[in-house]
Amino acid sequence: MNRLLFYLLIKPLSFLPLSVLYLLSTVGYYLLYYVLGYRRKVVEENIKRSFPDYSKAEVTRVIKLFYQHLCDLVVESIRMFSMSEAEAVRRCRIRNPELIDQFFDQGKHVVIVGSHYGNWEITSLCFPSQVKHQIGSIYSRLKNAYFNRKLMVSRARYGSELITTDKLSDYYELAHPRPVGLAFIADQSPNYNKTKNYYWTTFLNQETVTAPGAERYAQKYNLPVVYVQILKQRRGYYEIELELVTDDPKSLAPGELTDRHLRCLERLIIRAPQYWLWSHRRWKHRRN
Protein backbone atom coordinates (compact mmCIF):
# COMPACT_ATOMS: atom_id res chain seq x y z
CA MET A 1 0.00 0.00 0.00
CA ASN A 2 2.80 2.44 0.86
CA ARG A 3 4.52 1.73 -2.43
CA LEU A 4 1.30 2.29 -4.39
CA LEU A 5 0.62 5.54 -2.53
CA PHE A 6 4.10 6.83 -3.31
CA TYR A 7 4.34 5.84 -6.99
CA LEU A 8 0.70 6.43 -7.97
CA LEU A 9 0.09 9.66 -6.08
CA ILE A 10 3.02 11.38 -4.37
CA LYS A 11 5.69 10.88 -7.04
CA PRO A 12 3.47 11.95 -10.00
CA LEU A 13 2.35 15.01 -8.05
CA SER A 14 5.97 15.92 -7.35
CA PHE A 15 6.54 16.57 -11.08
CA LEU A 16 3.86 19.28 -11.15
CA PRO A 17 4.94 22.90 -10.82
CA LEU A 18 4.20 24.56 -7.50
CA SER A 19 1.79 26.94 -9.22
CA VAL A 20 -0.46 23.91 -9.82
CA LEU A 21 0.22 22.27 -6.45
CA TYR A 22 -0.82 25.45 -4.66
CA LEU A 23 -4.34 24.90 -6.03
CA LEU A 24 -4.35 21.64 -4.08
CA SER A 25 -2.98 23.52 -1.08
CA THR A 26 -5.91 25.93 -1.16
CA VAL A 27 -8.39 23.06 -1.29
CA GLY A 28 -6.49 21.34 1.53
CA TYR A 29 -6.71 24.47 3.66
CA TYR A 30 -10.50 24.56 3.45
CA LEU A 31 -10.68 20.87 4.26
CA LEU A 32 -8.27 21.01 7.23
CA TYR A 33 -9.57 24.22 8.73
CA TYR A 34 -13.29 24.29 7.98
CA VAL A 35 -14.22 20.61 7.55
CA LEU A 36 -11.83 18.37 9.48
CA GLY A 37 -10.58 20.84 12.07
CA TYR A 38 -7.21 19.06 12.07
CA ARG A 39 -5.67 19.52 15.55
CA ARG A 40 -7.62 22.73 15.85
CA LYS A 41 -7.83 22.61 19.64
CA VAL A 42 -4.08 22.02 19.97
CA VAL A 43 -3.27 24.89 17.62
CA GLU A 44 -5.70 27.30 19.28
CA GLU A 45 -4.55 26.47 22.80
CA ASN A 46 -0.86 26.80 21.87
CA ILE A 47 -1.39 30.22 20.32
CA LYS A 48 -3.58 31.52 23.14
CA ARG A 49 -1.03 30.54 25.78
CA SER A 50 1.89 31.90 23.76
CA PHE A 51 0.17 35.24 23.11
CA PRO A 52 -2.09 35.89 26.10
CA ASP A 53 -2.63 39.51 25.01
CA TYR A 54 -4.06 38.52 21.62
CA SER A 55 -7.75 39.21 21.07
CA LYS A 56 -10.03 36.45 19.79
CA ALA A 57 -9.84 37.99 16.31
CA GLU A 58 -6.03 38.02 16.38
CA VAL A 59 -5.89 34.38 17.47
CA THR A 60 -8.28 33.40 14.67
CA ARG A 61 -6.22 35.34 12.12
CA VAL A 62 -2.99 33.54 13.11
CA ILE A 63 -4.73 30.16 13.10
CA LYS A 64 -6.02 30.66 9.56
CA LEU A 65 -2.65 31.88 8.31
CA PHE A 66 -0.98 28.89 9.98
CA TYR A 67 -3.24 26.37 8.23
CA GLN A 68 -2.65 28.09 4.89
CA HIS A 69 1.10 27.87 5.44
CA LEU A 70 0.87 24.26 6.64
CA CYS A 71 -0.91 23.21 3.44
CA ASP A 72 1.66 25.10 1.36
CA LEU A 73 4.38 23.26 3.28
CA VAL A 74 2.79 19.89 2.47
CA VAL A 75 2.71 20.51 -1.28
CA GLU A 76 6.19 22.05 -1.24
CA SER A 77 7.45 18.89 0.51
CA ILE A 78 5.80 16.75 -2.18
CA ARG A 79 7.43 18.87 -4.91
CA MET A 80 10.82 18.30 -3.27
CA PHE A 81 10.80 14.62 -4.25
CA SER A 82 11.51 15.80 -7.82
CA MET A 83 12.96 19.27 -7.21
CA SER A 84 16.33 20.00 -8.79
CA GLU A 85 19.14 21.42 -6.71
CA ALA A 86 19.08 24.61 -8.78
CA GLU A 87 15.39 25.13 -8.04
CA ALA A 88 15.91 24.43 -4.33
CA VAL A 89 18.67 27.06 -4.16
CA ARG A 90 16.57 29.54 -6.14
CA ARG A 91 13.71 29.06 -3.71
CA CYS A 92 15.82 29.19 -0.55
CA ARG A 93 19.01 31.26 -0.59
CA ILE A 94 21.39 31.86 2.30
CA ARG A 95 21.96 35.59 2.72
CA ASN A 96 25.21 35.38 4.70
CA PRO A 97 27.04 32.06 4.13
CA GLU A 98 30.29 33.78 5.10
CA LEU A 99 29.22 33.60 8.75
CA ILE A 100 29.59 29.82 8.73
CA ASP A 101 32.30 29.62 6.05
CA GLN A 102 34.74 31.46 8.31
CA PHE A 103 34.82 28.41 10.60
CA PHE A 104 35.44 26.11 7.65
CA ASP A 105 38.45 28.25 6.73
CA GLN A 106 39.68 27.75 10.31
CA GLY A 107 39.24 23.99 9.97
CA LYS A 108 36.43 23.89 12.56
CA HIS A 109 33.33 21.73 12.70
CA VAL A 110 30.16 23.64 13.65
CA VAL A 111 26.79 22.95 15.21
CA ILE A 112 23.85 24.25 13.17
CA VAL A 113 20.56 24.72 15.02
CA GLY A 114 17.23 24.98 13.24
CA SER A 115 13.55 24.68 14.08
CA HIS A 116 10.16 23.82 12.62
CA TYR A 117 9.73 27.30 11.24
CA GLY A 118 9.20 28.35 7.62
CA ASN A 119 10.14 25.43 5.38
CA TRP A 120 12.76 23.42 7.23
CA GLU A 121 12.54 20.50 4.77
CA ILE A 122 14.06 22.45 1.89
CA THR A 123 17.26 23.15 3.85
CA SER A 124 18.58 19.61 3.29
CA LEU A 125 18.39 20.27 -0.48
CA CYS A 126 19.58 23.88 -0.65
CA PHE A 127 22.18 24.04 2.12
CA PRO A 128 25.05 21.80 0.88
CA SER A 129 25.85 23.83 -2.23
CA GLN A 130 25.74 27.19 -0.45
CA VAL A 131 28.18 26.51 2.41
CA LYS A 132 31.61 24.90 2.55
CA HIS A 133 30.96 22.40 5.38
CA GLN A 134 29.78 18.85 4.88
CA ILE A 135 26.21 18.92 6.23
CA GLY A 136 25.26 16.13 8.63
CA SER A 137 21.56 16.34 9.51
CA ILE A 138 20.35 14.65 12.69
CA TYR A 139 16.87 13.19 12.40
CA SER A 140 14.48 10.79 14.12
CA ARG A 141 13.25 7.79 12.16
CA LEU A 142 9.65 7.78 10.97
CA LYS A 143 7.50 4.95 12.24
CA ASN A 144 6.65 4.06 8.64
CA ALA A 145 9.81 2.31 7.40
CA TYR A 146 8.96 2.69 3.71
CA PHE A 147 8.46 6.45 3.80
CA ASN A 148 11.43 6.79 6.14
CA ARG A 149 13.65 5.33 3.40
CA LYS A 150 12.10 7.52 0.70
CA LEU A 151 12.59 10.67 2.76
CA MET A 152 16.18 9.76 3.58
CA VAL A 153 17.03 9.26 -0.10
CA SER A 154 15.28 12.49 -1.07
CA ARG A 155 16.91 14.62 1.62
CA ALA A 156 20.40 13.27 0.98
CA ARG A 157 20.53 13.41 -2.81
CA TYR A 158 22.34 16.78 -3.03
CA GLY A 159 25.01 16.14 -0.44
CA SER A 160 23.46 16.14 3.03
CA GLU A 161 24.31 13.15 5.19
CA LEU A 162 21.46 11.83 7.36
CA ILE A 163 22.31 10.69 10.90
CA THR A 164 19.95 9.11 13.41
CA THR A 165 20.28 10.38 16.97
CA ASP A 166 21.67 7.05 18.20
CA LYS A 167 24.48 7.17 15.62
CA LEU A 168 25.53 10.77 16.17
CA SER A 169 28.58 10.06 18.34
CA ASP A 170 29.83 7.43 15.90
CA TYR A 171 29.38 9.83 12.99
CA TYR A 172 31.24 12.66 14.68
CA GLU A 173 34.19 10.46 15.64
CA LEU A 174 34.70 9.36 12.03
CA ALA A 175 37.52 10.92 10.01
CA HIS A 176 35.88 13.41 7.63
CA PRO A 177 37.56 14.78 4.49
CA ARG A 178 36.30 18.28 5.36
CA PRO A 179 34.80 20.02 8.42
CA VAL A 180 31.24 19.02 9.26
CA GLY A 181 28.18 21.08 10.12
CA LEU A 182 26.03 19.04 12.51
CA ALA A 183 22.43 20.19 11.96
CA PHE A 184 19.91 19.86 14.80
CA ILE A 185 16.19 20.61 14.82
CA ALA A 186 15.86 21.71 18.41
CA ASP A 187 12.32 22.90 19.13
CA GLN A 188 10.37 19.66 19.56
CA SER A 189 9.03 18.35 22.83
CA PRO A 190 11.48 15.62 23.92
CA ASN A 191 10.63 12.09 24.96
CA TYR A 192 10.57 13.30 28.52
CA ASN A 193 12.09 11.17 31.26
CA LYS A 194 12.30 12.73 34.72
CA THR A 195 15.57 10.92 35.43
CA LYS A 196 17.39 12.49 32.46
CA ASN A 197 19.07 15.86 32.20
CA TYR A 198 16.70 18.25 30.44
CA TYR A 199 16.65 22.02 30.39
CA TRP A 200 13.63 23.98 31.58
CA THR A 201 13.07 27.59 30.62
CA THR A 202 10.31 30.10 29.89
CA PHE A 203 9.57 30.11 26.17
CA LEU A 204 6.62 31.99 24.66
CA ASN A 205 5.31 32.73 28.15
CA GLN A 206 5.26 29.06 29.15
CA GLU A 207 7.40 26.68 31.17
CA THR A 208 9.12 24.64 28.46
CA VAL A 209 11.34 21.57 28.56
CA THR A 210 14.06 21.04 25.95
CA ALA A 211 16.56 18.28 25.27
CA PRO A 212 19.91 20.14 25.14
CA GLY A 213 21.47 17.90 22.47
CA ALA A 214 22.95 20.73 20.42
CA GLU A 215 24.44 22.31 23.54
CA ARG A 216 25.85 18.98 24.71
CA TYR A 217 27.81 18.38 21.51
CA ALA A 218 28.88 21.98 21.12
CA GLN A 219 30.35 22.08 24.63
CA LYS A 220 31.84 18.59 24.51
CA TYR A 221 33.85 19.37 21.36
CA ASN A 222 33.94 23.19 21.76
CA LEU A 223 32.14 23.82 18.47
CA PRO A 224 30.78 27.19 17.30
CA VAL A 225 26.98 27.27 17.13
CA VAL A 226 25.00 28.92 14.32
CA TYR A 227 21.22 29.38 14.27
CA VAL A 228 19.27 29.10 10.99
CA GLN A 229 16.50 31.66 10.58
CA ILE A 230 14.22 30.63 7.70
CA LEU A 231 12.37 33.73 6.53
CA LYS A 232 9.40 33.31 4.20
CA GLN A 233 9.45 35.97 1.49
CA ARG A 234 6.37 34.86 -0.42
CA ARG A 235 4.66 31.64 -1.43
CA GLY A 236 7.36 29.09 -2.31
CA TYR A 237 10.32 31.39 -1.63
CA TYR A 238 12.46 31.62 1.49
CA GLU A 239 15.70 33.21 2.61
CA ILE A 240 18.02 32.02 5.35
CA GLU A 241 19.71 34.44 7.71
CA LEU A 242 22.45 32.78 9.78
CA GLU A 243 22.95 34.05 13.32
CA LEU A 244 25.97 33.29 15.49
CA VAL A 245 24.84 31.89 18.84
CA THR A 246 28.37 31.49 20.22
CA ASP A 247 31.91 30.75 19.07
CA ASP A 248 33.01 29.83 22.60
CA PRO A 249 30.44 27.36 24.00
CA LYS A 250 32.62 26.14 26.87
CA SER A 251 32.54 29.59 28.40
CA LEU A 252 28.75 29.41 28.85
CA ALA A 253 26.91 28.19 31.93
CA PRO A 254 24.79 25.01 31.67
CA GLY A 255 21.61 25.78 29.77
CA GLU A 256 22.76 29.19 28.53
CA LEU A 257 23.52 28.03 25.00
CA THR A 258 20.16 26.26 24.73
CA ASP A 259 18.43 29.36 26.02
CA ARG A 260 20.21 31.52 23.45
CA HIS A 261 19.05 29.54 20.43
CA LEU A 262 15.52 29.33 21.86
CA ARG A 263 15.50 33.14 22.04
CA CYS A 264 16.47 33.23 18.34
CA LEU A 265 13.39 31.14 17.56
CA GLU A 266 11.18 33.11 19.92
CA ARG A 267 12.03 36.35 18.11
CA LEU A 268 11.10 34.75 14.79
CA ILE A 269 7.77 33.49 16.11
CA ILE A 270 6.83 36.83 17.70
CA ARG A 271 7.57 38.60 14.41
CA ALA A 272 5.54 36.18 12.22
CA PRO A 273 3.83 33.47 14.30
CA GLN A 274 1.98 31.80 11.43
CA TYR A 275 5.12 30.06 10.14
CA TRP A 276 5.82 27.92 13.21
CA LEU A 277 4.46 24.38 13.64
CA TRP A 278 1.65 25.08 16.09
CA SER A 279 0.00 21.69 15.58
CA HIS A 280 2.81 20.03 17.55
CA ARG A 281 1.98 19.40 21.23
CA ARG A 282 4.99 21.36 22.41
CA TRP A 283 3.85 21.88 26.00
CA LYS A 284 2.54 18.43 26.91
CA HIS A 285 5.06 18.08 29.79
CA ARG A 286 4.89 20.00 33.05
CA ARG A 287 7.68 20.72 35.49
CA ASN A 288 7.23 18.98 38.82
Image: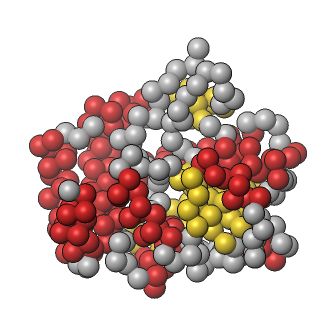
279 left or right of 256? left
Residue 38: x percent and y percent? Answer: 23, 41
- Between 151 and 241, the one nearer to me in the picture: 151
> Is residue 163 among the parts visible in the rendering?
yes
Q: Quadrant of residue 106?
A: bottom right
269 left or right of 70? right
Q: Residue at x 65, y 21 (%)?
A: 195
Of the 4 image quadrants, the one containing the C terminus is top right
Q: Which residue is drawn at 51% across and 78% down?
A: 158
Give the vertical position of 247 relative to 212 (above or below): below
Q: How many numbered marks have been drawn onto this rendered protein structure?
A: 0
Give the vertical position of 41 relative to 142 (above or below): above
Residue 155: x percent and y percent? Answer: 47, 68
Which color scheme does this rendered protein use?
secondary structure
Residue 71: x percent and y percent? Answer: 27, 57
Q: Residue furthest left?
A: 35
- Between 22 and 111, the one nearer to me in the picture: 111
169 left or right of 286? right
52 left or right of 224? left
- Between 201 and 271, the one nearer to me in the picture: 201
Give the vertical position of 172 relative to 200 (above or below): below
Q: Which residue lies furthest to the top in this view?
A: 288
Residue 204: x percent and y percent? Answer: 52, 35
Q: Residue at x 40, y 57 (%)?
A: 148
> Is residue 58 among the parts visible in the rendering?
no
Of the 4 image quadrants, the one containing the N terminus is bottom left
Q: Residue furthest bottom?
A: 86
Q: Residue at x 35, y 65 (%)?
A: 77
